[in-house]
Image (cartoon, rainbow, N blue to C red):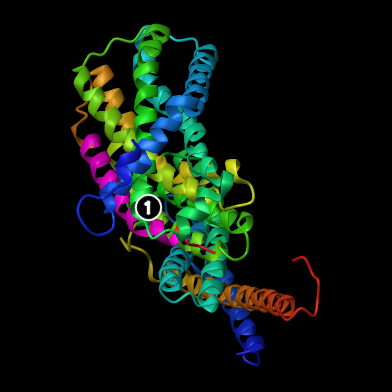
Amino acid sequence: MTTAAVPRGSGAPGLLDILRVTLAKDLRLEWRSKDAINSMLFFALLVVVIFSFGFDLTAEESRRIAGGLVWVALLFAAVVALNQTWARELRNQVLDAYRVSPAPAESLFLAKAVGNFLFVILLEALMAPLFVVFYNLRSVGPPYQLAIASVLGTWALVVNGTFFAAMSIRTRSREVMLPLLLFPISIPALLAMVAATTGVLTGDSSPYLPLVFLGVYDIVFTIIGFFLFETVLHAE
Amino acid sequence: MRSFFPIFALITLALLSYGLYQALVAAPREATMGDAQRIFYYHVPSAWTAFLCFFANLVASIWYLATRNPKVDAIALSTAEVGVVFTTVVLVTGPIWAKPIWGIWWTWDARLTSTLVLWLIYVSYLLLRRYSTAGQNPVLASVLAIFGAADVVFVYMAIRWFRTQHPQPVIGGGEGSGLDPRMWNALLVNWLGFLALAGLVIYLRYRLERLRQQVEEAHAMKAIAGTTRSTR
Protein backbone atom coordinates (compact mmCIF):
# COMPACT_ATOMS: atom_id res chain seq x y z
CA MET A 1 0.00 0.00 0.00
CA THR A 2 2.73 2.43 0.91
CA THR A 3 4.44 2.04 -2.43
CA ALA A 4 1.32 3.01 -4.37
CA ALA A 5 2.13 6.68 -4.08
CA VAL A 6 5.39 6.36 -5.98
CA PRO A 7 4.82 7.42 -9.59
CA ARG A 8 6.10 5.24 -12.33
CA GLY A 9 8.79 6.78 -14.49
CA SER A 10 9.17 10.53 -14.50
CA GLY A 11 6.83 13.41 -13.71
CA ALA A 12 4.21 14.00 -11.06
CA PRO A 13 1.63 11.33 -10.21
CA GLY A 14 -1.37 11.51 -12.51
CA LEU A 15 -5.05 11.75 -11.74
CA LEU A 16 -5.50 7.99 -11.60
CA ASP A 17 -2.50 7.42 -9.32
CA ILE A 18 -3.85 9.85 -6.75
CA LEU A 19 -7.32 8.43 -7.11
CA ARG A 20 -5.96 4.95 -6.38
CA VAL A 21 -3.92 6.03 -3.37
CA THR A 22 -6.74 8.05 -1.82
CA LEU A 23 -9.23 5.27 -2.41
CA ALA A 24 -6.89 2.69 -0.92
CA LYS A 25 -6.37 4.88 2.12
CA ASP A 26 -10.12 5.36 2.62
CA LEU A 27 -10.87 1.68 2.21
CA ARG A 28 -8.13 0.78 4.66
CA LEU A 29 -9.42 3.32 7.18
CA GLU A 30 -12.91 1.97 6.80
CA TRP A 31 -11.74 -1.62 7.01
CA ARG A 32 -10.07 -0.90 10.34
CA SER A 33 -12.66 1.38 11.91
CA LYS A 34 -15.88 0.23 10.14
CA ASP A 35 -17.39 3.56 11.20
CA ALA A 36 -19.42 4.28 8.10
CA ILE A 37 -20.64 0.80 7.32
CA ASN A 38 -21.70 -0.01 10.89
CA SER A 39 -23.71 3.14 11.38
CA MET A 40 -25.22 2.92 7.88
CA LEU A 41 -26.15 -0.70 8.30
CA PHE A 42 -27.81 -0.23 11.64
CA PHE A 43 -29.58 2.91 10.47
CA ALA A 44 -30.93 1.19 7.36
CA LEU A 45 -32.02 -1.77 9.46
CA LEU A 46 -33.94 0.57 11.75
CA VAL A 47 -35.61 2.26 8.80
CA VAL A 48 -36.69 -1.08 7.37
CA VAL A 49 -38.12 -2.22 10.69
CA ILE A 50 -39.87 1.09 11.34
CA PHE A 51 -41.39 1.13 7.85
CA SER A 52 -42.76 -2.37 8.34
CA PHE A 53 -44.33 -1.25 11.62
CA GLY A 54 -45.66 1.89 9.95
CA PHE A 55 -47.39 -0.01 7.15
CA ASP A 56 -49.01 -3.37 7.67
CA LEU A 57 -48.55 -4.88 4.23
CA THR A 58 -49.66 -7.89 2.25
CA ALA A 59 -47.17 -9.52 -0.14
CA GLU A 60 -48.83 -7.95 -3.17
CA GLU A 61 -48.85 -4.44 -1.68
CA SER A 62 -45.29 -4.72 -0.48
CA ARG A 63 -44.10 -5.71 -3.95
CA ARG A 64 -45.75 -2.59 -5.29
CA ILE A 65 -44.21 -0.17 -2.78
CA ALA A 66 -40.94 -1.96 -1.95
CA GLY A 67 -39.09 -0.02 -4.67
CA GLY A 68 -39.92 3.21 -2.89
CA LEU A 69 -39.14 1.84 0.57
CA VAL A 70 -35.76 0.45 -0.43
CA TRP A 71 -34.58 3.66 -2.00
CA VAL A 72 -35.85 5.96 0.72
CA ALA A 73 -34.14 3.75 3.33
CA LEU A 74 -30.92 3.78 1.31
CA LEU A 75 -31.08 7.53 0.74
CA PHE A 76 -31.35 8.13 4.49
CA ALA A 77 -28.68 5.58 5.29
CA ALA A 78 -26.28 6.90 2.65
CA VAL A 79 -26.39 10.34 4.25
CA VAL A 80 -24.86 8.83 7.39
CA ALA A 81 -21.83 7.61 5.43
CA LEU A 82 -21.62 10.66 3.18
CA ASN A 83 -21.39 12.96 6.17
CA GLN A 84 -18.32 11.10 7.37
CA THR A 85 -16.56 11.39 4.00
CA TRP A 86 -15.11 14.80 4.63
CA ALA A 87 -15.63 15.10 8.39
CA ARG A 88 -12.93 12.44 8.65
CA GLU A 89 -10.51 14.74 6.82
CA LEU A 90 -11.08 17.70 9.14
CA ARG A 91 -9.14 16.11 11.97
CA ASN A 92 -5.48 17.17 11.89
CA GLN A 93 -6.33 19.63 9.09
CA VAL A 94 -6.05 16.95 6.41
CA LEU A 95 -8.47 18.83 4.20
CA ASP A 96 -6.30 21.95 4.39
CA ALA A 97 -3.33 19.84 3.42
CA TYR A 98 -5.24 18.59 0.38
CA ARG A 99 -6.03 22.17 -0.49
CA VAL A 100 -2.40 23.29 -0.57
CA SER A 101 -1.11 20.13 -2.22
CA PRO A 102 -0.67 20.21 -5.99
CA ALA A 103 -2.71 16.99 -6.34
CA PRO A 104 -5.67 17.50 -8.70
CA ALA A 105 -8.87 18.07 -6.72
CA GLU A 106 -10.85 15.99 -9.23
CA SER A 107 -9.01 12.81 -8.35
CA LEU A 108 -9.78 13.39 -4.67
CA PHE A 109 -13.46 13.85 -5.52
CA LEU A 110 -13.62 10.73 -7.67
CA ALA A 111 -11.78 8.68 -5.04
CA LYS A 112 -14.25 9.75 -2.35
CA ALA A 113 -17.20 9.09 -4.64
CA VAL A 114 -15.94 5.63 -5.58
CA GLY A 115 -15.26 4.85 -1.91
CA ASN A 116 -18.78 5.88 -0.91
CA PHE A 117 -20.17 3.94 -3.83
CA LEU A 118 -18.45 0.78 -2.60
CA PHE A 119 -19.75 1.32 0.95
CA VAL A 120 -23.34 1.84 -0.19
CA ILE A 121 -23.21 -1.10 -2.62
CA LEU A 122 -21.95 -3.28 0.22
CA LEU A 123 -24.78 -1.98 2.37
CA GLU A 124 -27.27 -2.86 -0.36
CA ALA A 125 -25.87 -6.37 -0.66
CA LEU A 126 -26.31 -6.83 3.08
CA MET A 127 -29.76 -5.22 3.18
CA ALA A 128 -31.27 -7.05 0.20
CA PRO A 129 -31.85 -10.36 2.06
CA LEU A 130 -33.39 -8.45 4.95
CA PHE A 131 -35.85 -6.74 2.65
CA VAL A 132 -36.77 -10.04 1.04
CA VAL A 133 -37.41 -11.57 4.45
CA PHE A 134 -39.28 -8.68 6.07
CA TYR A 135 -41.46 -7.80 3.10
CA ASN A 136 -41.98 -11.26 1.58
CA LEU A 137 -40.54 -10.03 -1.70
CA ARG A 138 -40.28 -12.08 -4.83
CA SER A 139 -39.24 -10.41 -8.05
CA VAL A 140 -41.48 -11.00 -11.06
CA GLY A 141 -38.99 -9.53 -13.54
CA PRO A 142 -35.39 -10.72 -14.01
CA PRO A 143 -33.29 -9.94 -10.89
CA TYR A 144 -30.19 -8.90 -12.87
CA GLN A 145 -32.09 -5.75 -13.82
CA LEU A 146 -32.33 -4.93 -10.11
CA ALA A 147 -28.55 -5.11 -9.96
CA ILE A 148 -28.24 -2.63 -12.84
CA ALA A 149 -30.75 -0.32 -11.18
CA SER A 150 -28.89 -0.45 -7.89
CA VAL A 151 -25.52 0.31 -9.49
CA LEU A 152 -26.84 3.27 -11.50
CA GLY A 153 -29.04 4.52 -8.67
CA THR A 154 -26.30 4.25 -6.06
CA TRP A 155 -23.88 6.19 -8.22
CA ALA A 156 -26.51 8.91 -8.70
CA LEU A 157 -26.93 9.25 -4.92
CA VAL A 158 -23.26 9.00 -4.12
CA VAL A 159 -21.78 11.30 -6.73
CA ASN A 160 -24.06 14.18 -5.73
CA GLY A 161 -23.83 13.21 -2.06
CA THR A 162 -20.03 13.31 -2.06
CA PHE A 163 -20.11 16.68 -3.74
CA PHE A 164 -22.70 18.20 -1.41
CA ALA A 165 -20.98 16.73 1.63
CA ALA A 166 -17.93 18.75 0.64
CA MET A 167 -20.18 21.81 0.49
CA SER A 168 -22.03 21.16 3.75
CA ILE A 169 -18.78 20.59 5.63
CA ARG A 170 -18.03 24.26 4.98
CA THR A 171 -21.24 25.48 6.60
CA ARG A 172 -22.02 26.12 10.23
CA SER A 173 -24.52 23.30 10.65
CA ARG A 174 -22.51 20.58 8.95
CA GLU A 175 -24.44 17.34 9.33
CA VAL A 176 -27.85 18.95 9.00
CA MET A 177 -27.01 20.73 5.76
CA LEU A 178 -26.21 17.68 3.63
CA PRO A 179 -29.72 16.18 3.36
CA LEU A 180 -31.16 19.66 2.85
CA LEU A 181 -28.97 20.11 -0.22
CA LEU A 182 -28.94 16.53 -1.47
CA PHE A 183 -32.62 15.56 -1.27
CA PRO A 184 -34.10 18.21 -3.60
CA ILE A 185 -31.43 17.55 -6.24
CA SER A 186 -31.92 13.79 -5.92
CA ILE A 187 -35.67 13.82 -6.52
CA PRO A 188 -35.51 12.99 -10.26
CA ALA A 189 -32.97 10.23 -9.64
CA LEU A 190 -35.15 8.84 -6.86
CA LEU A 191 -38.17 8.83 -9.17
CA ALA A 192 -36.22 6.89 -11.80
CA MET A 193 -34.79 4.41 -9.27
CA VAL A 194 -38.22 3.72 -7.85
CA ALA A 195 -39.75 3.41 -11.33
CA ALA A 196 -37.04 0.94 -12.41
CA THR A 197 -37.17 -1.13 -9.21
CA THR A 198 -40.95 -1.27 -9.07
CA GLY A 199 -41.04 -2.12 -12.77
CA VAL A 200 -38.80 -5.13 -12.21
CA LEU A 201 -40.44 -6.27 -8.96
CA THR A 202 -43.99 -6.17 -10.24
CA GLY A 203 -43.22 -6.99 -13.88
CA ASP A 204 -45.82 -4.40 -14.86
CA SER A 205 -43.58 -2.02 -16.77
CA SER A 206 -40.24 -2.11 -18.52
CA PRO A 207 -37.34 -0.69 -16.48
CA TYR A 208 -35.54 0.27 -19.69
CA LEU A 209 -36.49 3.96 -19.83
CA PRO A 210 -35.78 4.72 -16.13
CA LEU A 211 -32.43 2.93 -16.40
CA VAL A 212 -31.41 4.99 -19.42
CA PHE A 213 -32.61 8.10 -17.59
CA LEU A 214 -30.49 7.18 -14.56
CA GLY A 215 -27.49 6.58 -16.81
CA VAL A 216 -27.83 10.05 -18.34
CA TYR A 217 -28.37 11.60 -14.90
CA ASP A 218 -25.22 9.87 -13.64
CA ILE A 219 -23.15 11.09 -16.56
CA VAL A 220 -24.38 14.69 -16.39
CA PHE A 221 -23.89 15.08 -12.64
CA THR A 222 -20.56 13.28 -12.64
CA ILE A 223 -19.33 15.77 -15.22
CA ILE A 224 -20.70 18.80 -13.34
CA GLY A 225 -19.26 17.54 -10.05
CA PHE A 226 -15.94 16.73 -11.67
CA PHE A 227 -15.49 20.20 -13.09
CA LEU A 228 -16.86 22.21 -10.16
CA PHE A 229 -15.22 20.31 -7.33
CA GLU A 230 -12.02 22.29 -7.38
CA THR A 231 -14.04 25.50 -7.03
CA VAL A 232 -15.75 24.13 -3.93
CA LEU A 233 -12.58 22.73 -2.40
CA HIS A 234 -10.82 26.06 -2.75
CA ALA A 235 -13.76 28.27 -1.73
CA GLU A 236 -12.48 30.67 0.88
CA MET B 1 -31.04 55.31 -9.99
CA ARG B 2 -31.72 56.55 -6.45
CA SER B 3 -33.61 59.61 -7.68
CA PHE B 4 -35.42 57.46 -10.21
CA PHE B 5 -36.58 55.11 -7.48
CA PRO B 6 -39.76 56.98 -6.34
CA ILE B 7 -40.90 57.34 -9.95
CA PHE B 8 -40.33 53.67 -10.57
CA ALA B 9 -42.24 52.82 -7.39
CA LEU B 10 -45.16 54.97 -8.53
CA ILE B 11 -45.20 53.33 -11.95
CA THR B 12 -45.25 49.92 -10.26
CA LEU B 13 -48.12 50.94 -8.02
CA ALA B 14 -50.08 52.31 -10.99
CA LEU B 15 -49.48 49.16 -13.04
CA LEU B 16 -50.55 46.90 -10.19
CA SER B 17 -53.72 48.91 -9.50
CA TYR B 18 -54.62 49.00 -13.19
CA GLY B 19 -53.87 45.26 -13.33
CA LEU B 20 -56.16 44.63 -10.37
CA TYR B 21 -58.96 46.51 -12.12
CA GLN B 22 -58.31 44.65 -15.36
CA ALA B 23 -58.29 41.26 -13.65
CA LEU B 24 -61.32 41.72 -11.43
CA VAL B 25 -63.56 44.02 -13.47
CA ALA B 26 -62.55 44.53 -17.09
CA ALA B 27 -61.71 40.95 -18.03
CA PRO B 28 -64.81 38.94 -18.96
CA ARG B 29 -66.12 36.16 -16.77
CA GLU B 30 -64.77 32.83 -17.97
CA ALA B 31 -67.52 30.66 -19.48
CA THR B 32 -66.99 27.37 -17.63
CA MET B 33 -64.80 28.22 -14.64
CA GLY B 34 -66.53 31.42 -13.56
CA ASP B 35 -64.82 33.95 -11.35
CA ALA B 36 -62.39 31.38 -9.95
CA GLN B 37 -60.51 31.72 -13.22
CA ARG B 38 -59.53 35.29 -12.31
CA ILE B 39 -56.76 34.00 -10.05
CA PHE B 40 -55.08 33.05 -13.33
CA TYR B 41 -54.12 36.74 -13.75
CA TYR B 42 -51.98 36.46 -10.63
CA HIS B 43 -50.89 32.84 -10.88
CA VAL B 44 -49.40 32.93 -14.38
CA PRO B 45 -47.60 36.32 -14.13
CA SER B 46 -46.07 35.20 -10.81
CA ALA B 47 -44.82 32.01 -12.46
CA TRP B 48 -43.29 33.85 -15.40
CA THR B 49 -41.67 36.39 -13.09
CA ALA B 50 -40.33 33.66 -10.82
CA PHE B 51 -38.81 31.74 -13.73
CA LEU B 52 -37.17 34.92 -15.00
CA CYS B 53 -35.73 35.53 -11.52
CA PHE B 54 -34.28 32.02 -11.37
CA PHE B 55 -32.88 32.38 -14.86
CA ALA B 56 -31.24 35.66 -13.84
CA ASN B 57 -29.91 33.89 -10.75
CA LEU B 58 -28.33 31.15 -12.88
CA VAL B 59 -26.70 33.69 -15.20
CA ALA B 60 -25.44 35.72 -12.22
CA SER B 61 -24.11 32.56 -10.54
CA ILE B 62 -22.09 31.52 -13.59
CA TRP B 63 -20.95 35.09 -14.05
CA TYR B 64 -19.88 35.24 -10.42
CA LEU B 65 -17.82 32.05 -10.70
CA ALA B 66 -16.08 33.53 -13.73
CA THR B 67 -15.41 37.01 -12.33
CA ARG B 68 -15.76 36.76 -8.49
CA ASN B 69 -17.35 40.19 -8.54
CA PRO B 70 -19.32 40.77 -5.29
CA LYS B 71 -21.83 42.99 -7.13
CA VAL B 72 -22.82 40.04 -9.30
CA ASP B 73 -23.23 37.91 -6.18
CA ALA B 74 -25.57 40.52 -4.71
CA ILE B 75 -27.68 40.19 -7.87
CA ALA B 76 -27.68 36.40 -7.53
CA LEU B 77 -28.84 36.60 -3.92
CA SER B 78 -31.61 39.13 -4.52
CA THR B 79 -33.00 37.37 -7.61
CA ALA B 80 -33.05 34.05 -5.75
CA GLU B 81 -34.95 35.51 -2.81
CA VAL B 82 -37.51 37.29 -4.98
CA GLY B 83 -37.83 34.18 -7.14
CA VAL B 84 -38.65 32.09 -4.08
CA VAL B 85 -41.30 34.59 -3.01
CA PHE B 86 -42.98 34.57 -6.42
CA THR B 87 -42.82 30.78 -6.65
CA THR B 88 -44.50 30.65 -3.25
CA VAL B 89 -47.28 32.81 -4.70
CA VAL B 90 -47.57 30.37 -7.61
CA LEU B 91 -47.72 27.37 -5.31
CA VAL B 92 -50.36 28.99 -3.10
CA THR B 93 -52.60 30.38 -5.82
CA GLY B 94 -52.45 27.16 -7.86
CA PRO B 95 -54.26 24.93 -5.34
CA ILE B 96 -56.78 27.69 -4.54
CA TRP B 97 -57.73 27.65 -8.21
CA ALA B 98 -57.47 23.88 -8.59
CA LYS B 99 -59.83 22.98 -5.75
CA PRO B 100 -63.03 24.38 -7.32
CA ILE B 101 -61.99 23.59 -10.90
CA TRP B 102 -60.35 20.15 -10.71
CA GLY B 103 -61.93 19.20 -7.39
CA ILE B 104 -58.50 18.52 -5.86
CA TRP B 105 -55.93 20.78 -4.27
CA TRP B 106 -52.91 19.18 -5.80
CA THR B 107 -51.90 16.70 -8.45
CA TRP B 108 -48.44 15.38 -9.18
CA ASP B 109 -48.33 16.48 -12.78
CA ALA B 110 -45.14 17.59 -14.48
CA ARG B 111 -45.62 21.34 -14.28
CA LEU B 112 -46.77 21.47 -10.66
CA THR B 113 -44.16 19.07 -9.43
CA SER B 114 -41.29 20.73 -11.31
CA THR B 115 -42.31 24.07 -9.84
CA LEU B 116 -42.40 22.54 -6.37
CA VAL B 117 -38.97 20.95 -6.81
CA LEU B 118 -37.59 24.20 -8.19
CA TRP B 119 -38.91 25.93 -5.07
CA LEU B 120 -37.32 23.25 -2.85
CA ILE B 121 -33.97 23.64 -4.61
CA TYR B 122 -34.00 27.40 -4.18
CA VAL B 123 -35.06 27.17 -0.54
CA SER B 124 -32.05 24.92 0.00
CA TYR B 125 -30.00 27.51 -1.88
CA LEU B 126 -31.12 30.22 0.55
CA LEU B 127 -30.46 27.94 3.52
CA LEU B 128 -26.97 27.24 2.22
CA ARG B 129 -26.37 30.97 1.93
CA ARG B 130 -27.59 31.52 5.45
CA TYR B 131 -25.53 28.76 7.04
CA SER B 132 -22.21 29.15 5.32
CA THR B 133 -19.61 31.57 6.54
CA ALA B 134 -19.51 34.87 4.72
CA GLY B 135 -16.41 34.32 2.61
CA GLN B 136 -17.29 31.00 0.99
CA ASN B 137 -20.98 31.53 0.76
CA PRO B 138 -21.17 33.09 -2.75
CA VAL B 139 -19.01 30.38 -4.31
CA LEU B 140 -20.92 27.48 -2.75
CA ALA B 141 -24.25 29.09 -3.60
CA SER B 142 -23.25 29.67 -7.25
CA VAL B 143 -22.22 26.05 -7.58
CA LEU B 144 -25.53 24.90 -6.12
CA ALA B 145 -27.41 27.13 -8.57
CA ILE B 146 -25.71 25.34 -11.48
CA PHE B 147 -26.64 21.94 -10.02
CA GLY B 148 -30.20 23.13 -9.52
CA ALA B 149 -30.54 24.35 -13.10
CA ALA B 150 -29.29 21.03 -14.46
CA ASP B 151 -31.64 19.20 -12.13
CA VAL B 152 -34.82 20.99 -13.20
CA VAL B 153 -34.59 19.46 -16.67
CA PHE B 154 -34.35 16.00 -15.14
CA VAL B 155 -37.21 16.68 -12.76
CA TYR B 156 -39.53 17.63 -15.60
CA MET B 157 -38.63 14.57 -17.67
CA ALA B 158 -38.75 12.18 -14.70
CA ILE B 159 -42.23 13.26 -13.73
CA ARG B 160 -43.55 13.09 -17.26
CA TRP B 161 -42.19 9.59 -17.72
CA PHE B 162 -42.40 7.89 -14.35
CA ARG B 163 -45.41 9.27 -12.55
CA THR B 164 -48.34 7.50 -14.08
CA GLN B 165 -51.28 9.47 -12.65
CA HIS B 166 -51.53 12.14 -15.35
CA PRO B 167 -54.95 13.75 -15.23
CA GLN B 168 -53.78 15.87 -18.19
CA PRO B 169 -55.33 18.97 -16.68
CA VAL B 170 -56.51 21.81 -18.85
CA ILE B 171 -54.27 24.60 -17.65
CA GLY B 172 -56.61 27.58 -17.45
CA GLY B 173 -56.94 28.83 -20.99
CA GLY B 174 -53.81 27.08 -22.21
CA GLU B 175 -51.03 28.67 -24.24
CA GLY B 176 -53.04 31.43 -25.87
CA SER B 177 -55.65 28.94 -27.04
CA GLY B 178 -58.71 31.10 -27.48
CA LEU B 179 -57.94 33.65 -24.78
CA ASP B 180 -60.22 36.66 -25.06
CA PRO B 181 -58.20 39.81 -25.98
CA ARG B 182 -59.42 41.45 -22.76
CA MET B 183 -58.09 38.46 -20.84
CA TRP B 184 -54.74 38.81 -22.58
CA ASN B 185 -54.80 42.45 -21.64
CA ALA B 186 -55.38 41.71 -17.95
CA LEU B 187 -52.73 39.02 -18.04
CA LEU B 188 -50.06 41.16 -19.67
CA VAL B 189 -50.76 44.24 -17.56
CA ASN B 190 -50.46 42.15 -14.43
CA TRP B 191 -47.29 40.59 -15.69
CA LEU B 192 -45.79 44.00 -16.33
CA GLY B 193 -46.86 45.07 -12.85
CA PHE B 194 -45.33 41.98 -11.27
CA LEU B 195 -42.12 42.42 -13.25
CA ALA B 196 -41.88 46.01 -12.08
CA LEU B 197 -42.54 44.94 -8.49
CA ALA B 198 -39.91 42.20 -8.75
CA GLY B 199 -37.44 44.68 -10.21
CA LEU B 200 -38.15 47.11 -7.41
CA VAL B 201 -37.68 44.56 -4.64
CA ILE B 202 -34.59 43.10 -6.32
CA TYR B 203 -33.12 46.59 -6.52
CA LEU B 204 -33.79 47.26 -2.83
CA ARG B 205 -32.43 43.89 -1.81
CA TYR B 206 -29.39 44.45 -4.01
CA ARG B 207 -28.69 47.79 -2.33
CA LEU B 208 -29.03 46.21 1.09
CA GLU B 209 -26.71 43.35 0.22
CA ARG B 210 -24.13 45.76 -1.22
CA LEU B 211 -24.22 47.79 1.98
CA ARG B 212 -23.78 44.63 4.03
CA GLN B 213 -20.80 43.65 1.86
CA GLN B 214 -19.27 47.09 2.27
CA VAL B 215 -19.72 47.03 6.04
CA GLU B 216 -18.08 43.63 6.18
CA GLU B 217 -15.25 44.83 3.99
CA ALA B 218 -14.73 47.88 6.19
CA HIS B 219 -14.58 45.66 9.27
CA ALA B 220 -12.03 43.44 7.57
CA MET B 221 -9.91 46.42 6.54
CA LYS B 222 -10.04 47.79 10.06
CA ALA B 223 -9.00 44.47 11.53
CA ILE B 224 -6.07 44.26 9.10
CA ALA B 225 -5.01 47.80 9.95
CA GLY B 226 -4.91 46.74 13.59
CA THR B 227 -6.97 49.69 14.74
CA THR B 228 -9.51 47.39 16.33
CA ARG B 229 -9.49 44.09 18.18
CA SER B 230 -12.90 43.19 16.83
CA THR B 231 -13.42 39.41 16.76
CA ARG B 232 -15.75 39.37 13.80
Residue B9 % position (x, y): 63, 82
- At a point 61% along the width and 73% down the height, the residue shown is B201
Nearest the camera: A34 or B90?
A: A34
Characterize the magenta stretch by its predominant secondary structure: helix
Q: Is residue A13 left or right of residue B64?
A: left
For the C terminus of chain B, the image quarter is: bottom right
Nearest the camera: B23 or B111?
A: B111
Q: Picture quarter containing residue B163?
A: top left
* Element marked by disc 1: helix
Asked if residue B18 is positioned above or below residue A132 in the image, the reply reads below
- Label 1 resides on the chain identified as B
Q: Is residue A169 visible?
A: yes
- At a point 58% along the width and 69% down the height, the residue shown is B20
Mark 1 crowdedness (10 Å alpha carbons): few <14, some 14-19, many ≥20? some
The verdict on residue A217 being magenta is yes
Asked if residue B195 is positioned above or below residue A101 in the image, the reply reads below
The verdict on residue A153 being magenta is no
Q: Which segment did they paint magenta?
A: A210-231
Asked if residue A30 is positioned above or below residue B43 in the image, the reply reads above
Nearest the camera: B118 or B179?
A: B118
Counting every numbered tag in the picture gives 1
Q: Is residue A20 left or right of residue B23?
A: left
For the N terminus of chain B, the image quarter is: bottom right
Q: Which residue is mark 1?
A: B152
Looking at the rendered structure, the kind of residue marked 1 is: Val
- At a point 39% along the width and 29% down the height, the residue shown is A119
